[in-house]
Image: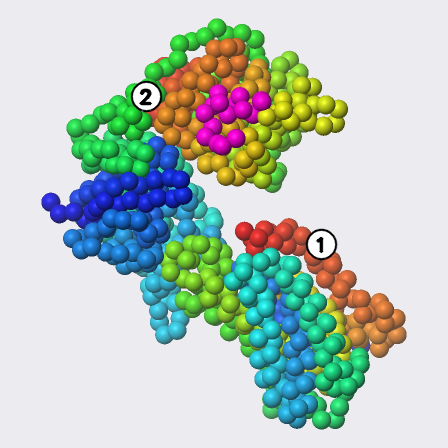
Amino acid sequence: MFDQLFDGALLESVFRALIPILLAAIGGLVCERAGVFQISLEGMMLVGAFAAVAGSYLGQSALLGVTIAMAVTALFSLILGYGAVTRRGDPIVLGVAVNLLALGLTSFLLPQLFGVRGVFQHPRIDGLDRLAIPFLSDLPLIGQALFNLTIPGYLSLLAIPLIWLFLFRTPIGLRLRGVGERPASAETLGVSSTQYKYAAVVFSGLACGLAGAQLALGNVVQFAENMSSGRGWIAVVAVMLGRAHPAGVLGASALFGFAEGLGFRLQGNGLPVQITEALPYVVTLIALALARKRFQRILELTAA
Amino acid sequence: MSNALELRGISKSFPGVRANDNVDLEVRRGDIHAIVGENGAGKTTLMSILYGLTAPDSGEIVVDGRTVRFNSALDAIAAGLGMVHQAFKLFPTLTVAENVVFRNEPRTGIFLDRAEAAKRVRALGSEYGLMVDPGARIEDLPVGVLQRVEILKALYRDAQVLILDEPTAVLTPQERDNLFVTLRRLKDRGRTVIFITHKLGEVMAVSDRVTVLRGGRAVAHLDTASTSPTEVSRLMTGRNVDLDSRPPPSLLGEAVLSVTDLTVRDDDGLVRVDAVSLEVRSGEILGVAAVAGNGQHELIEAICGLRPADRGSIVVGGREVAAADMAVTRESGLAYIPEDRHRVGTAAGGEVWANLVMGFQRRKRFRRGRFMRRAEVEEHARRIIADYDVRVAGPAVTAATLSGGNLQKLVVGREMSHAAPLLVAEEPTRGVDVGAIEFLHRQLVEYRSQGGGILLLSAELWELLALSSRVVVMYEGRIVAELDPAETDEAELGFFMTGGSR
């Protein structure tokens, strides 16, 4: 049975599930490193998906949709930035508020702008094309999964080594980590924690905009109410589980992507949809329970 | 000789307090200059003005003959000053080299030049005798090494004048001696050191000149060679202080604490107290000397019922309490002055009266049924405030607003007013000034003379020697020596504390 289960098609659905989670988690990990506890990934992803569809519909260009998604979500992220950094509010309370706002706002704007409820589908919405890399995409098993992706898909994979280089090998990355750990110490050496925290929050906005665009123009070509459906929360968990380290976050995102992809696949094999759809969340719960100590430590660190 | 630094007529007021009052200070180049004063004498304010963290109301700062104006610590760093704060400003998960070069990073292209950073740290380290592994993570290093990293940080930024705020407060005697070697080497290389302390022994041991602050004013500028600890302490407090004379012995009575063959594990399951036996009798002070992390804290926690004993027996007031919780242990006759007065000793959000009735709340006279008798409780609080000279407006003030020294007096006062047969005192004088130390020492001796038994833990070896009837030394969870304070000294204690044996 297993040789039937594990094939190129499974890997493809794993990557489909993985990429939006990974993009959002990359945003979350940079915030975590800068000392901003970022739990509004879910809401930002949803706003990104909405803006991507709106942009693509109005401009009839997928790339315009992606650009608008990133710009709008970056602006949207400033709500958390202002509240948590400038006003020093509780990032958890603010994050919950931002998530609720995103859900309400997109559900409200959907009928206002497009005259529909629930789901918005239209031939004018231009979806993201998959760009096959010659030869590599013909490789058995991994070819289609890894080398026939959308632009956000390639960016998500490239981002992992780049973020690692940035954080651990550049002076700016060093300062960002310093700000995240001891903002007061960084200030005494003349590094503005406000500046770095804002930059991190806006970066997470850009990343979630991209994640939302992938979700609404790549995985499907439509906007559906609450279409992020918990992926942003899973990204939050991936940041914690991966200890805000690029490789760890990639691993954790891959685990959740795998759970979702496998669920999708098992559904085809006749397992009830309620069970297969629950799979990623069950994996999340198990992962959280296993990483309980680490989770607490991160909470303590960000609270300090 | 030229002055590296001068302060002229510095004044600074905060609402209700004149923290610095027309302070002059001249620091000669290449000197080790001590600044001493009691808590609240204005040392900290003066140093934050000097380092650009606070703007003075009036007065000027002169560095190398030029009048300067600091708007932030960055300006002070640029002018050649370097500060080693009492609470280190390091990044725990970053490496030593990353901490040292932070914001002045050597680069190759857009990348951090890590090899160069490590090289610079090693070079500075060998020049000043501050050997540290540049690749080590800060969180893995002991406190004494962290201080070296802070000094390296200042030297890397080419500080000509180093300001150290109470640098020895967190050090073991050995680390303190190493620090003094470093300070002398800095002086030999022409750097200037400003050294803030309230420990007179250190002033005499290491400084060239001393400035004494009292009540916000600089009351004396002295050459260390031509003064004495007595003179400096009189100038600091405005009266004669006697810290060194040993109390007369008092009559010994029954054992108030007997610990037999006690083994205690820490949260990770490691044995921290290893088959320890000791006894405190009524009328004596038993001192415990140990370098931090050698099991003394776990021993205290086990005695107080805060940590389960793995094996062995603890008898307080004739009752076995090894398996008991704190409430039972307290009923058996224990009072406890914890080391951490902020998190363990007090509830910061509570009022002073609430903090003072804690531990007494079950007593009949403070209760009417399930409610507290506020009048009684406040009366009790007022008495402790008066007896222990806690500087606070009244019992209704929130504890969080009290300074460290006042909070300490509050905790000590509360615990002593239990008049329990056994008093466990952990660092009872940490962070309080020399006048208050003298007062608290008198109280401890009085407690003992009234028939109380005291188990005293202190990182200040002179304090242990001055107060204790006997001193035991703990090393790696075991008692390795018992000494008579009249016949031993700090050097011998330090020898046993670091694992020496004969």
Q: CA distance from mark 2 to mark 1?
A: 59 Å
Q: Which residue is drawn at the image coordinates 65% and 67% (left, top)?
A: A98
The type of residue carrying mark 1 is Ala
Question: What residue is drawn where x is 17% and y is 53%?
Answer: B64
Q: Are marks 2 and 1 on the same chain?
A: no
Q: Position of residue A67 (x, y in %)?
A: 58, 84
Mark nearer the viewer, 2 or 1: 2
Q: Quadrant of the N terminus of chain A?
A: bottom right
- Image: B101 above or below A200: above
Q: Is residue B492 magenta?
A: no
In the rendered view, does A45 fall on the left or right side of B154? right
- The residue tagged 2 is B241
Give the image location of residue B105, x and y in percent.
35, 64
Q: Dot 1 surroundings within 10 Å: few (below 14), some, or many (20 or more)?
A: few
Q: Is residue A106 left or right of residue B53?
A: right
Residue numbers of the magenta segment: B379-394
Percent x, y for residue B283? 50, 11
Q: At numbered mark 2, what does the secondary structure look like: helix, strand or loop?
A: loop
Q: Is residue B426 visible?
A: no
Secondary structure, mark 1, is: helix
Residue drawn at x 51%, y 18% is B454
Reply above or below: B480 against A246.
above
Q: Amino acid at mark 2?
A: Val
Chain name for mark 1:
A
Which residue is denoted by mark 1 in the rendering? Answer: A289
Decide which of B457, B339 is in the foreground and name it: B339
